[in-house]
Amino acid sequence: MQPQNESLTSVGSKIKTGLPSPWPPPSPWLGIFSLALLACFSRPLYQLIRFSLQSDLYSHIVLIPAVSAYLIWLKRPEFRGGSTPDRIIAGAFLSLGVLVFAGYKVAVAGSVPLAPEDSLALLTASFLLFFIGLCSWFVDRTTLRAIAFPLGLLVFMIPFPVVVRSALETFLQHGSADVAYAFFRLTGTTVFYDNLVFRLPGINLQVAPECSGIHSSLALFITSLIAGHFFLRTPWKCTVLTLAVIPLAILRNGFRIFTLGELCVHISPDMIDSYIHHHGGPIFFVLSLIPFFLLLRVLYRSDQRGKTSPPPAS
């Protein structure tokens, strides 16, 4: 009977050692300092939530923390522990947080006029730098490397400064208008194009900043980052997928302008006030997902072939 007990014990130990080790719980100090940080920034964070709920461009901000938390939860199997935190990286993030916050205070004290977006951008950036610095201070390097993407995704909580938003809108305006003009020429539509204004038979169309498509372009950009993180292994293929969003966004918005112009010419100029103009953005966004997912499929299949191909002979 004794040999049998030893055999069962050895088998049990093998089964036990074969089980994955539980992921190390985070330091309680991380939670304590994070709560203190939330308390210190409670007012600007509340203003950020209110601002995002009233804005079409920044409506995604309230979802970003939940998405990042979910991605961190999925990364639990990669939390190995056993290494020490990187206090140098932590110090760098904390120092940057102090500099950004000090810059905001200097601007306010010097009576520098800051738009609401600029104020929220500075305060939110300072908050995120402090938070990532805390994570780097208390979380070991292996775990921090595993959650680097979810933490980086939090950057989309920061509203664009006014100068950045204006530059993006101008770029998308002119790019979309150029594409729309090319579509008009290809279809033989009589058109005169001058500085974002289309003179069509019976109607003139101007591509306003609100027609730049920046909202749907930003949504597609964030989607490309998350899709690449989930489905692609090679960094350069993730980069290709993300950069492809830029021409795809311009083509989508240019096609939308072209479609609206054709409807105004061939059906009625009253189409300028139709549903497709004021609320048709989601329709064209869904259309842009078709080439996006086709490209994702091509890159994914390429990744899978590279994964299963035999190593080169030495």
Image (tube, grey):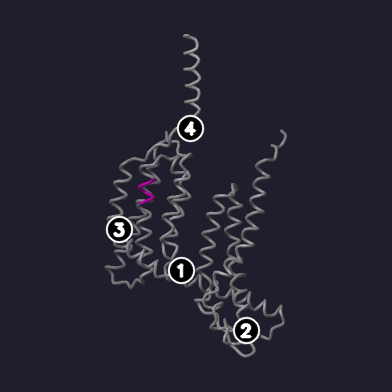
Magenta span includes 94: no
Q: Main secondary structure of the magenta part?
A: helix
* Residue occupied by mark 3: 41
**Label 4, label 1: how far apart the Cα atoms are:** 43 Å
**Label 4, label 3: how far apart the Cα atoms are:** 38 Å
Helix, strand or loop status at disc 1:
loop
Relative horizontal placement of residue 37, taking residue 132 as reference (left or right): left
For label 1, count other residues whose C-alpha is less than 10 Å away and answer few (under 14), some (14-19) or many (20+).
some
Position of the C terminus by quadrant: top right
* Residue occupied by mark 4: 20
Question: In front here: 239 or 229?
Answer: 229
| Amino acid on which disc 2 is placed | Tyr
Contact, mark 4 vs mark 1 (Cβ under 8 Å)? no
Q: Residue at x 59, y 47 (%)?
A: 233
For label 4, count other residues whose C-alpha is less than 10 Å away and answer few (under 14), some (14-19) or many (20+).
few
| Amino acid on which disc 4 is placed | Pro
* Residue occupied by mark 2: 193
The numbered disc on residue 307 is: none
Q: Earlier in the sequence, mark 4 or mark 3?
A: 4
Q: Earlier in the sequence, mark 2 or mark 3?
A: 3
The numbered disc on residue 57 is: 1
Q: Residue at x 52, y 77 (%)?
A: 278
